[in-house]
Amino acid sequence: MGIIQILLLISFILLFAGLYGVFKKAGEQPWKALVPVYNIVVWLKLLQKPWWWVFLVIIPAVGFYMLAVLIVLTSNAFGKRKFGEHVLAVCGYFAWMPWLGFSSANEWKGVPRDEINKHFLKEWGEAAVFAVVAATLIRTFFFEAFVIPSSSMEGTLRVGDYLFVSKMSYGAKVPSIPLTFPFTHNTMPFTETTPSYVDWIELPEIRLPGWSDVERGDIVVFNFPEGDTVYTGNRNRSYYGFIRVMSQNSRLSESQIRQIYVPDSIVVHPTDKKDNYVKRCVATAGDKFEIRDQQIYINGAAQKFPKEVQFSYNFNIPKGYNSWESFQYDLNANGITDNFYYSQNDTARQFTVSCSEANSKILEKITGAPVSRAFFPKGMCKVPSLNPMYFESLVDDVFPHDTTHFKWNRDNFGPLLIPKEGMTVKLSLDSLPLWRRIIEVYEHNKLEIKGGQIYINGQLATTYTFQQNYYFMMGDNRHNSLDSRYWGFVPEDHVVGKPVFVWMSRGEHSGLRPERMMTFVSKDGLSKSYLWFVITGIAIYAGWSYYRGKKKKEAESKRPSLRKNK
């Protein structure tokens, strides 16, 4: 326990010590202030508030807001009703509550029946607090708004799709970091690196029961597994992956790269504050997963491609285009929404773009020449750079980042066993890269290698039993997606929810996309749009309200005056 945690503990002891004196002055048995949870129930009774508010107080996401409300209401009961006094009470609760409870200058006056001449800031403040509480409850336990930031699910979910994510589908998680700025995830608004939370209090991971388990084929929102440490210059790439790639590009060792990119250049997040990703679950716990020539196999059986799956296709830009921008515009206008870049085969100044097989035929018409699907053959671990600024060869940085024992790439991967809770695997130095991050990071064990042998928590280990389920996630845009092929398994405690509804969609080049608005999300993609049904319903309601209002006014104008003539 650090110094901050100790100070917080002392502050809460002082708070409830002050409550002891408050109860005594209010005519309540003071010992009740020392009984956890029951003291909140009694406190609410004294303030004439509903008993069920106790649940709002003990929920981590909103509990601190509700405590602030109770402290303000208690101040009112002592006649301290000025706005400045309320600010002082909330900010200095650890001194304010003992002062109210034990100072002879303060007298319990009871809950005021009405609040005359209430300061407008106080009125708005109280409304704002309860609005924050209600919105936070909805956002934490029911639905959260989410916007698709990258093209990894392009075809199925596009950049600029605004979603509602159901937290109830797989069970909402009780926030482990309760001290968070409202309506933010991990950074403050209009910043990219300023944390919107403090980790002074970190609670155990608790998940409420959900409607179902994660199933193969589900589209899932989850916390980026390697997102515990990210490089500030590229938040989509973990710090570990960034160091590996920079080492390969520069031919410096990873330790040298770490000295160049010092810890000041990284951001560290707890689990539920890692960046949110959305991908498709292609393998669940206990599955044997493999990719052979771009085809996924589960337990030896070939799996159907998602309806809107995309791969990269190589092509040459026709000479008639004056700029890359004009060519990109034509691609977007014809339904090819991903950006193009230099191909992996740079011998003929080829380019590549991700699209569906059907759109590859459109690409052929635009270019006036055949196009070919990009492909990495089995055993190929070195590919030309995907970065237009570099053309030297580098290792395709796929999991588990050990090309000596695992010659895998994005098109030929595995076979790989997906860990399941209670499953036991044999450990060796050769297989350790597959399981090391699970053992050390996700399941919080100390792993050491001594004399060519593996030790876990100081004990010699030849096997390991997994403590939770894991999943393998991939983007439908198979050649333009950073997914489990690059950073490995997704732990069950990282699962956030399931996208269920697209309420708005706006493309960078195409503007509003009405055909995608007001649609439901399923394994097969988006439903038909209900936008016009919604607009029609709103128009009918507005017309009916106008008609009723007009009739009401006409009826009132025809009534005889009730005033008496003097």
Image: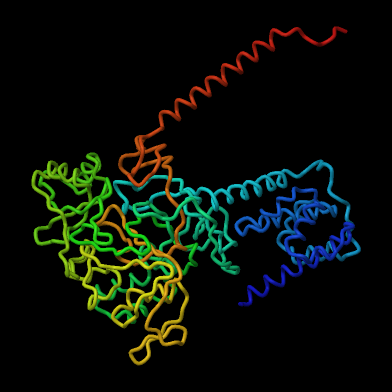
Residue drawn at 41 percent across, 62 percent down: 224
Q: How many marks?
A: 0
Residue drawn at 45 percent across, 81 percent down: 446
Residue drawn at 51 percent across, 63 percent down: 195
Quadrant hosting residue 460: bottom left
Quadrant hosting residue 255: bottom left
Q: Is residue 565 left or right of residue 135?
A: right
Indicate the position of residue 470 as horizontal and vertical percent values. 40, 64
Residue 252 appears in view: yes
Indicate the position of residue 284 as horizontal and vertical percent values. 36, 60
* Relative height, residue 444 to residue 452 (above, below): above
Indicate the position of residue 488 as horizontal and vertical percent values. 34, 67
Colouring of the image = rainbow
Q: Is residue 426 left or right of residue 314?
A: right
- Towards the viewer: 551 or 522: 522
Quadrant hosting residue 504: top left
* Relative height, residue 449 to residue 106 (above, below): below
- Towards the viewer: 104 or 381: 381
- Towards the viewer: 376 or 468: 468
Indicate the position of residue 359 as horizontal and vertical percent values. 19, 44
Image quarter hosting the C terminus: top right
Image quarter hosting the N terminus: bottom right
Q: Is residue 558 left or right of residue 369?
A: right
Residue 387 appears in view: no
